[in-house]
Amino acid sequence: MIRLKYPFHKIDRSSLWQSYDYDQLQQAKDKLGITDAWVSYSWGFSEATEQDDYQFLRERLVHFRRLGIRTHAYVQGTNLVWADNQDHDYYCRDHRGYLIPYHRGRKLTCPNNPAFREYIHSKVALALQEDVDGVFVDNMHFGLFPVMLGKSRSTFFGCRCDYCQQLFRQEVGSGIPGLFHRQTDLFEAYADFRVRRLMNLVGELADQVHAAGKVFGTNSFDPRFDTRLFYGTDMPQLAALQDYLLFENHSLPSTNHSNAYLKPLVRPSSTPVFVVSYNKGIGREKHYSQADFDAVYSESQMLGYVPCYKASEYTTKRVWHNLRFEQIQPVQRVEPRRKKVKLVENSLPQLPGGRWLSWLFNRMYVPAMVRYYENKLIRRSMGWLYYRVAR
Ligand SMILES: [Zn+2]
């Protein structure tokens, strides 16, 4: 998995092999108070490729049981490893018929595609056979993310595969457009259709997991953006269908960042909210200091969310490794480090508009993403730019 995402990093393999060992988990429980663990089950490779992973997990689940840590089997959501899954056409298409990339080596899959729905139900059914307490489906969003172009237009978003076209025509009586004009009935109708169809799949998966007597949740990414427009998800529906909400963002508490903007989503909800916060993000995240752990713990107590840590995706001095529990002391409550408080902005990413610029951005959106994910030099320079300019 790491080799597919980041082919050039050095990897401390032994730290990863040991991550589900009893003594490692005991330290996680003693020092960080771990109650739940999201354990790797299926990352979107084929079943043949993943056989060793299933066996690895199966042999170690007993350690979690002995320590009373609940386990949630991780199943990849609406994307698959392209090289391993070309036996069926599970995939989204943009307005020009292109497959849509999801990071390196993966393509987005369509929630309206019957073959993909069958696929994900069968993966969840496999996960349910293991001695886990729940199933977690990651990266649950529908097709391409929209970007606003000026005030009135957005890039193409979602999916325009044959299944989507056919269903949208049946339900709305019109084709899915290429460039969306925001102030039109068609824009609203498509945004609603996208949410309705994705929530339909989440509802089916929730029913499947609950029927087995296990808990269910998905990754809702960062709700700083309008989730209905950006991801195609509806927060109240997710809270009703799932046993918890889980957000993933770049707001590791510091003097410049905090999760206070999540307050309106955390407080009124009776559904538990887990938050995974990064500083720089996967592939660029060095091991947290004790002050980082203490800050996350303290902020979560103040805001009412449950802190969640990535265990295996730290890159310190260019080496990929698991959390080093021997370096961590039991977390303690400290004064918040935050200075800024931002409430949920509920917006979309913005680019300059104008008719020809919009046409150009829309045309380049997917091909540029492919170049970005598949080209090491472009990716590194854009990562640098993001960190220097966008934050
Ligand atoms: Zn589609």
Image: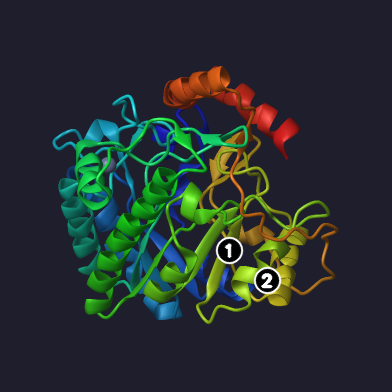
Labels 1 and 2 touching (C-beta < 8 A): yes
Between residues 74 and 29, which one lies in front from this camera angle? 74
Residue receiving disc 1: 275
Numbered disc 2: secondary structure: helix
Q: Position of residue 364 (x, y in %)?
A: 47, 20
Q: Is residue 162 left or right of residue 289?
A: left
Residue 22 in view: no
Task: Tell me if the residue at label 1 has its CB under 8 Å from ligand 1.
Answer: no
Q: Is residue 361 left or right of residue 166?
A: right
Which amino acid does the dot numbered 1 rest on?
Val
Which amino acid does the dot numbered 2 rest on?
Ser
Residue receiving disc 2: 300
Between residues 38 and 122, which one lies in front from this camera angle? 122
* First reached walking from the N terminus: tag 1 or tag 2: 1
Numbered disc 1: secondary structure: strand
Between residues 8 and 17, which one lies in front from this camera angle? 8
The image quadrant that residue 54 belongs to is bottom left
The image quadrant that residue 103 belongs to is top left
Residue at the image point whose x is 55% and y is 22% from the top: 355
Residue 321 in the image: above or below residue 124:
above
Q: Position of residue 151 (x, y in %)?
A: 62, 36
Q: Position of residue 19 (x, y in %)?
A: 46, 57
Residue 228 in view: yes
- Give me the disc on residue 90: none
Residue at the image point whose x is 43% and y is 63% from the top: 38
Q: Residues within 10 Å of mark 2 (few under 14, many from 20)?
A: many
